[in-house]
Amino acid sequence: MAQDLRNLFEEDRLAQRAKMSQDHEARFLDKLDKELPIEKKSSGFSFLNIAASVVVLLGLSFGAYKYFQSPVVVEPTQEVVDTDLKTLGDVSPDLKKVEDYYLASINLELSKVELTPQNKELFDGYVLRLQELNKEYDKLLEELNENGPNSVTLDALIENLKLRLNLVMRLKDKLEEFNDDAFEEEIG
């Protein structure tokens, strides 16, 4: 019963060829040509292909020009000053954090102060001192813009912020003392 499968497939294939008519392949190719006609390929570039190529070439040329453009060389004896500095944050992100911390703390403490007619004179004295420190801070920022960042100016700016925060904290303490004394006088 064992038969060679290769022999069976070969016999089957020969039997199928014999059953097809002789012009079957020719008729099949004719029908195929009618359904799927062969498209003629253009031998040259169309206008759109040329225009697209020119646009791409110009874009790449411009990009390469900008990329390989030589940087401006500054003589070593010249001092480069960045005149666009407005705050400490423009010098470095770390200094921005320091400046934001102090300014937020100052504003927070000032917002907690309760102003009454009795403590208005004390409050006004501290506000005048804060205004003087603000003016000094603005002068230091101008110096930073004129001379560029240096450790002396940066330290002075940070010290000014510390002084303002300390002044506000002292104001808060004095107002608490003042309110405590006023409360004791009312009771006593």
Image: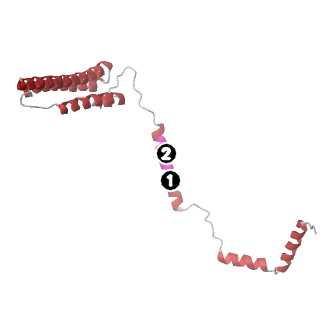
Give the residue displayed 66% in from the left and 71% down from the top.
38
Res 174 label: none
Residue 47 screen position, x and y as percent: 52, 61
Residue 59 screen position, x and y as percent: 47, 48
In this view of the protein, which residue sits in the foreground, 9 or 182?
Answer: 182
Give the residue displayed 90% in from the left and 68% down from the top.
7
> What span is in magenta?
54-65
Q: Secondary structure at mark 1?
A: helix
Residue at the spot of label 2: 61
Is residue 136 visible from the viewing direction of this image?
Answer: no
Q: CA distance from mark 2 to mark 1?
A: 10 Å
Give the residue displayed 78% in from the left and 79% down from the top.
24
Is residue 130 visible from the viewing direction of this image?
Answer: yes
Residue at the spot of label 1: 54
Q: Secondary structure at mark 2?
A: helix
Q: Quadrant of the C terminus?
A: top left
Three-letter code for the amino acid on which mark 2 is drawn: Ser
* Image position of 125 with respect to 57: above or below: above
Three-letter code for the amino acid on which mark 1 is drawn: Val
Figure quadrant of residue 146: top left
Q: Is residue 161 magenta?
A: no
